[in-house]
Amino acid sequence: MPLHYYFGVEIEAIAEPHTVRSPLLRWVYYEKLATALRWDGLEALADREVQYRKHSEHYDKWWITRDGSLKNPPHPQIPLEAVSPIMSTRQRWENEIDMFWASWHRIFHMPIQSNKCGSHVHISPWPEKEFRLDQLKSIAFGIILYEPLIEELLPANRRHNRFCEMNSSYSSRLRVCWDLQTVWIRIRGCDYKWELRRLMQEDKGTREDRYVLWNFDNILEGRSGTVEFRGGRGLRGPVRTKRWIAFVIAFIDMCLGEGYDSWDDFERPSMTMFWSKILWSASRNGIDDSLPSNWRAMPELVRDGILEDVSDTESSDGSVASSTLSKSDDAYCDSDCSECDKEFIIEELEQERREICVIL
């Protein structure tokens, strides 16, 4: 079993800047956030292209880019995705998360509360960065064994969500398994990683294949080697960001510890027992401080003293209404901005930082 883990988080957010430039160039605000991160000592890069690019070259820095699934929110709201660098449980990764949100708040208000936003956590073992097939089998069976309990932990908008469907209901091969023992036999019978991936989701050759709660796409040859959890809520501050990262690490570690190498009449425990196991695993990895003692705080059935969004109110579509009236698409002019314009604006941002030593 790994002693430590690598992981990364992808944060989808709809942001409203403190200071609105006219015209509103979204990539400028990606650059402003990246500049704020660098000013605070974190490696960061912004996507200056109109086309969407998922990540920087080596996942060695924060990557600020657009998120196509968030489309065009009302002016002056800006859709974005923040992709973290690869972090490790061997480091004080919590400090990196705290610093990210401190930098965020220099540029933007708290992210808009929206059902469109979610978060993803990728995880792999240290130092190999790829799970062995036997480890993946343990993770896969744990996912199905505890699936109804994990579903209870999800916020309401992440349940029955087409971007993170339960593996057992999405996979045609799992749907025909009538009990846990049949699932265990099917998983243990996979001789290759691609077979396990096909069992856990689908193999239609479309991007929708990865729209499951636990995505195994990246275990295939030549890919990153991570297992991806896609069920996290839209993150709006450091507490919940650390919480969902810690849950994913603790769950994967728990599955690897339990092994499931031989059939043993496995039964699903109560939620209380399941959460006790998660907390024990989190404690073993030194991340228990990031998880609530009461599992009901995960789907936010109870409040636990978090003050990240208590002042927000939701509109009828699940989003916080903008304080500024919606404008036409003409208010956004990213595609009309030349390379010379971009370089001039970036230099202007840098000059602004040098002169007043704060990011506005």
Image (spheres, grey):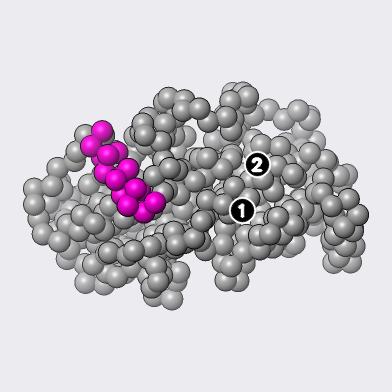
Could you tell me residue 180's position as x and y percent? 15, 48
Asked where in the image residue 114 lies, by quadrant, the reply is: top right
Give percent across and percent down for residue 57.
60, 71
The residue depicted at 57 percent of the width and 71 percent of the height is 58
Q: Nearer the viewer, residue 92 or 348?
A: 92
Q: How crowded is mark 1: few (under 14 residues within 10 Å), some or many (20 or more)?
A: many
The residue shown at (57%, 52%) is 95
> Which sits earlier in the primary sequence, circle 2 or circle 1?
2
Image quarter in which the N terminus is found: bottom left
Rendered image: mark on residue 14: 2
Question: Element under label 1?
Answer: strand
Q: Viewer-proximal residue, 69 or 131?
A: 131
Residue under pointer 1: 82
Looking at numbered disc 2 in the image, what kind of residue is underneath it? Ile
Mark 2 Cα shell of 10 Å, populated few (<14), some (14-19), many (≥20): many
Q: Specify whether 237 is left or right of 157.
A: right
Q: Is mark 2 on a helix, strand or loop?
A: strand
The quadrant holding residue 234 is top right
User: Which quadrant is the C terminus positioned in?
Assistant: top right
Left/right of residue 273 with respect to residue 16 in the rendered view: left
Q: Residue at x 52, y 55 (%)?
A: 93
Highlighted magenta segment, given as a residue range? 272-286
